[in-house]
Amino acid sequence: MGYSDDIPKGCGRPAAEPAYTNTTVTIPCHHIRVGDLLILQGRPCQVIRINTSSATGQHRYLGVDLFTKQLHEESSFISNPSPSVVVQTMLGPVFKQYRVLDLNGSTVVAMTETGDVRHSIPVLDQSSLIERLTEAFKTGRGSVRVLVISDGGREMAVDMKIIHGSRL
């Protein structure tokens, strides 16, 4: 019994179009790598494995849900914009950028794009993100920003960047 045994074989989505929303963006499959964030089965996931069918060339992604830690698997969307062109895409999340105001353990207090203050935004527990945030916040060089992913009212900081002087 594998993780994909409950998924019927051949249930790929040829010629299907992804369900676009204002919280997703299409990503060409050739840009996706292990560790990237995708929307799999409607959930924000970090990719842990990529398979390609030798028969069809279709990509299949296995990822871990960022919020529930459950596994999700999904095949790429295939479209044919012209007779000799095949394009494979997946849905990726749209990130919000918040300014870090304070750090509280493994959560951040941040200001949204609209000026609202969000307390206790959890930080992704991988890639030493909390350590990098702490170091950047302590040095005080530039404005520390977190990239936040949202899911059904929940938010999580998944990456960071520092904005220096002239771009504040």
Image (cartoon, helix red, strand yellow):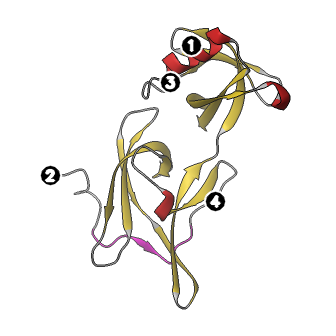
Mark 2 vs 4, N-terminal side: 2
C-alpha distance separating marks 2 and 1: 43 Å
The spot of residue 83 in percent (x, y) is: 55, 91
Q: Name the residue under label 2.
A: 1
Q: Is residue 152 in sight in this rendering?
A: no
Q: Is mark 1 on a helix, strand or loop?
A: helix
- Residue pointed to by mark 3: 129
134 vs 60, nearest the viewer? 134
For this rendering, which residue is in front, 155 or 105? 105
Label 3 and label 1: CA atoms lie apart by: 9 Å
State which tag comes first along the sequence, 2 or 1.
Answer: 2
The residue that disc 4 covers is: 20
137 over 87 or under it: above or below: above
Q: Are marks 3 and 1 in contact (CB under 8 Å)?
A: no
Closer mark to the observer between disc 4 and disc 1: 1
Q: Position of residue 56 (x, y in %)?
A: 34, 78
At label 4, counting other C-alpha atoms closer than 10 Å, the crowd grade (few under 14, some 14-19, many 20 or more) is: few
**Residue sitting farthest toward the left:** 1
The segment highlighted magenta reads 9-17
Residue at point 66% right, 54% down? 21
From the image, give the main secondary structure of the stretch colored magenta: loop
